[in-house]
Amino acid sequence: MSRRRAIYPGSFDPVTNGHLDVIGRALGLFDEVIVGVAHNEAKQHLFPTNERVALIRNSIGTRPGLSVEPLDGLLVDFCAKREAFVVIRGLRAVSDFEFEFQMALTNRRLKPQIETIFLTPKEDCIFLSSRIVKEVARLGGDVAPFVAPPVLEALKGKFSSF
């Protein structure tokens, strides 16, 4: 029997409650969800890839059908190697849609069998982004409502101001 497998890619620097919500929603739709933690050369990451992988694992715990892996190279190649033909992308606002739509079309052009599904996080997380969490933490604000406890502790280690 074929298992329904999806990839949820992102930099997750750091993982937020919005990301965790999308992971939970994806697990409700698919037998397996692989969270692909990408290294983006264009971004200066606060946490190295291995720490981001560990933070996701520690934040969500062990869940049947869930795995977290580093993602290097093209997303479509990562998907093909894992026989996953669905990509999950989170959408917070209309402003996210244009970029995500372009990426979905590019991925489809590269590997026509790969489909992209857009999921929205719950309303109390819809405004969250890793960038906002990092900025609030850097300035000494309370990010506890926005991230899981392991991420909060890791941010405290990076920014001693809170």
Image (cartoon, rainbow, N blue to C red):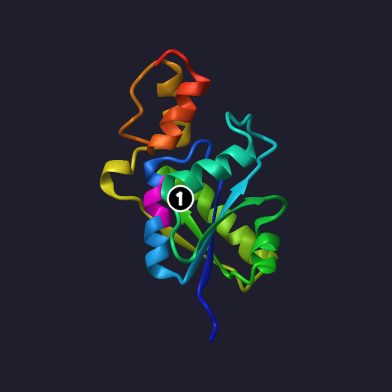
Q: Is residue 135 located in the magenta-colored stretch of the structure?
A: no
Direction top: furthest residue: 161
Residue kind at label 1, given as amino acid type = Phe
Q: Residue 44 appears at what percent x and percent y?
A: 63, 29
Direction left: furthest residue: 124
Count of numbered labels shown in the rendering: 1
Q: Between 76 and 31, which is closer to the camera in this rendering?
A: 31
**In this rendering, position of residue 55 left or right of residue 21:** right
Residue 11 in view: no
Q: Is residue 20 located in the magenta-colored stretch of the structure?
A: yes
Residue 122 in view: yes
Residue drawn at x 48%, y 31% as measured from the top left: 131
Q: Residue 34 appears at what percent x and percent y?
A: 55, 60
Q: Between 92 and 24, which is closer to the camera in this rendering?
A: 24
**In this rendering, position of residue 97 left or right of residue 83:** left
Residue drawn at x 47%, y 44% as measured from the top left: 58
Judged from the image, the secondary structure of the residue bearing numbered disc 1 is helix
**In this rendering, position of residue 94 left or right of residue 124:** right
User: Which quarter of the rendered picture does the C terminus lie within?
Assistant: top left
The correct choice, above or below, for 160 with respect to 25 in the image is: above
Q: Between 17 and 75, which is closer to the camera in this rendering?
A: 17
**In this rendering, position of residue 36 left or right of residue 120:** right
The correct choice, above or below, for 93 with respect to 134 in the image is: below
Range shown magenta: 19-23
Reading the image, the residue beneath label 1 is 97
Q: Residue 29 appears at what percent x and percent y?
A: 40, 69
Q: Residue 12 appears at what percent x and percent y?
A: 52, 42
The correct choice, above or below, for 132 with respect to 105 in the image is: above
Q: Between 156 and 86, which is closer to the camera in this rendering?
A: 156
